[in-house]
Image (cartoon, rainbow, N blue to C red):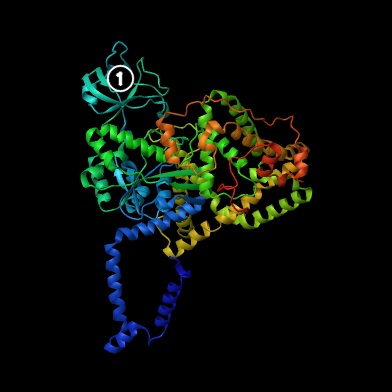
Amino acid sequence: MGGLNDFSVQVTVLWLLMMLSMDALNPVKAISSFLAVDSTIFGWLNFVVLVGVLYHNLSDVIYFCVRVFLNSVLSIFFKSIEIVGKDNIPLDGPVIFTGNHTNQFVDGIVVMMNSFRKVGFLTAEKSMKLPVVGHIAKAMGCLPIVRPQDAVVTGVGRVYMDSSSTESHVLVGEGTSFTRDISPGDQVRANGKVVKDSGAPVKVETVLDDTHLVLASPLVDRAGTVVTSATAFGIFKKVDQSTTFTEVYTALKRGQCVGIFPEGGSHDRTDLLPLKAGVALMAFGAKDQYHITVPVVPVGLNYFRGHRFRGRVVIEFGAPIAVTNENMDEYKADKRKACNAFLSAVEEGMRSVIVTAPDYNVLQLVYTARRLWQPSGVKLTPKDTQDLNRRFAEAYKVLSDVTVAQDDLAQLGLKLDEYRKSLTLMGLKDHQVPHIAWWSLHDVLASAIYGLVIFALASIPSFVLNAPVGLVARYVARAELDQGARRVERQDRGTGRDPVQEDLVLNGRRAVAVAVVRGPCDRRHGLALEQHLPPHRVVPALFVLWRPIGTVEAGIIELKTLRPLYYRLQPKYRKIQDELPQRRARLQMEVRMFVKKYASLLGPLAESTPMDWSAYMHLRHGKGGVEENDEPVPETPTITTEHDLSGFLRAHKTPSMINLGSLDMEGGAASSLTPNSPLESKKVV
């Protein structure tokens, strides 16, 4: 358990080393001397046995080797990967992992590399056929699955809903051949000019003739409006998934772990897409056919600057969700109802491990509010940070539905947005604001000289080596993204972010391989690209290219600090910077007072007690939202520009000494975090 720090391990290792170093104590040497046999015979026998063991466990060996390779990829692309709730993963037995899907290939790699269990993800059959990705997926034990959207067919003719039919949803076609092209169980959708403008697929119940068929629900466009005028349409053919389910059940019977992204495809939204029923069918099918209770572990993948190089990931494992005997009784009585109920439980579990918001801008405001709320000088754990982010995100959703709070919420949002834009303009981070008052002209000049020297000495050689790789990777990634946007892969693009993360990772590695192997060959053999470098030369070349990345990152960080220092030299921007600490102090107090004012509506979100997020999500989504409280909202003063904080600032000598505890005392705003709160009891670092 303790590794090399454990006393018994230390004694065992030292004893083995002593035996190997002395022929008299070496058991192999002693036995070979006694039998008068050459000791190398034992070595060859052990080698043969070793080869047999490796061959027998070849899949595990390949998995380990690929895991080492993919770990190197993640460690290069991401600055840090933090794990929360790892103790929620069962130590043995079959498990189904379900995660949110924001990146086509990176999501699965992140889960597999940060779970101590061997996980084989359900992967689109189309991806399994790709040259490099397919080989890696097979080596990692992934299972192929055919998705209807991978084989969407453009329908012949145009369609619209029959407005005269009131009892059923009849689709009328013009120049169509429904009897030939469509079968019951297929799905149709209203096609837009691009995929993201297309409507949601609708199941076909009955085909009446070549120009009429019955749908399960009305055909709608991207805006959710019923299609009443002739429009183009697409056909999703019904896919037989029996082979895939058989492979899944076989893996679960062996006690293996299966991963699935129940949203059905990658996207860049800040909320979940509707979940597919596959995960529920797997859990119920395993218990019904093989009497195996398979826990479903929700996985939350939270990326911070994930679309940028050297971003950060927080992966959170939620409490397992299992099919109970009561669920099975309901499943035998009504499969659809039971699957929907279990799918709702899975969705609630997934929402309990991610931070969702209506859009990307709101999500950034949530992060800003959390940073302002967080006491100065306190280092929160990833778990506490995620909990606080989720509290603010859910509080925004609750208060957005409360009429009496909407005006205050909008005003606070505008102030947070202005503060965030000011930081972006100045090139500052929130944690740097309290220290602006300490910056003098000497600090500016010294930091500028130091940053330039460090960046030049440490980063320029590596930048020359790696810049072509990064440029090629970004160019290829954007080209593939544009191509993917014309296919069905991307289901929605509602955040305005740049979802090229998975392509940057893959193409970055591809570009490095070209730079390392082909570059030297071109120089040595002209254009004879078929020549290859031996492995003992490729590995050092890879090390030379990738090792300085950390140095480059440190140099870039120093270089970025020059921007606010440069603005510090200009009177106009210096004034803005000097005002930021007071603006931050006012916003801190306003956020605290805002939470206090609406604490009665927020309920457990504003309390210091630990949150059971699964229970909260079940209560909130099960009730269809939180109803408005009839009780009057207590009047709480709000900080305005007319308030004078000079006395407060003088009491604390400098803006850098501002902390939330003193804000509570000066402003009279009681924090919901009590002295016994786990967040308040953190050590100051």
- Outermost residue on the top side: it is 164
Report crowding for label 1: few under 14, some 14 to 19, many 20 or more residues within 10 A (C-alpha).
some
Task: Using the rendered image of the protein, determine whether residue 483 is visible from the camera's viewpoint.
Answer: no
Q: Is residue 73 above or below residue 194?
A: below
Residue 206 at x, y percent in the picture: 22, 22
Residue 449 at x, y percent in the picture: 72, 53
The disc labelled 1 sits on which kind of residue? Gly
Q: Residue at x 56, y 46 (%)?
A: 677
Q: Residue at x 40, y 31 (%)?
A: 622
Quadrant containing the N terminus in the rendered view: bottom left
Q: Is residue 525 above or below residue 349?
A: below
Task: Answer with left or right where residue 663 lies relative to residue 633.
Answer: right
Q: Residue at x 51, y 50 (%)?
A: 78
Task: Answer with left or right where residue 640 lies relative to residue 285.
Answer: right
Find residue 274 and report its image quarter.
top left
Task: Using the rendered image of the protein, determine whether residue 198 is visible from the camera's viewpoint.
Answer: yes
Q: Is residue 215 above or below residue 561?
A: above
Of residues 659 and 150, the one drawn nearer to the viewer in this rendering: 659
Q: Residue at label 1?
A: 157
Residue 202 at x, y percent in the picture: 31, 25
Name the secondary structure under disc 1: loop
Of residues 418 and 390, the one drawn nearer to the viewer in this rendering: 390
Quadrant containing the C terminus in the rendered view: bottom right
Residue 262 at x, y percent in the picture: 36, 39
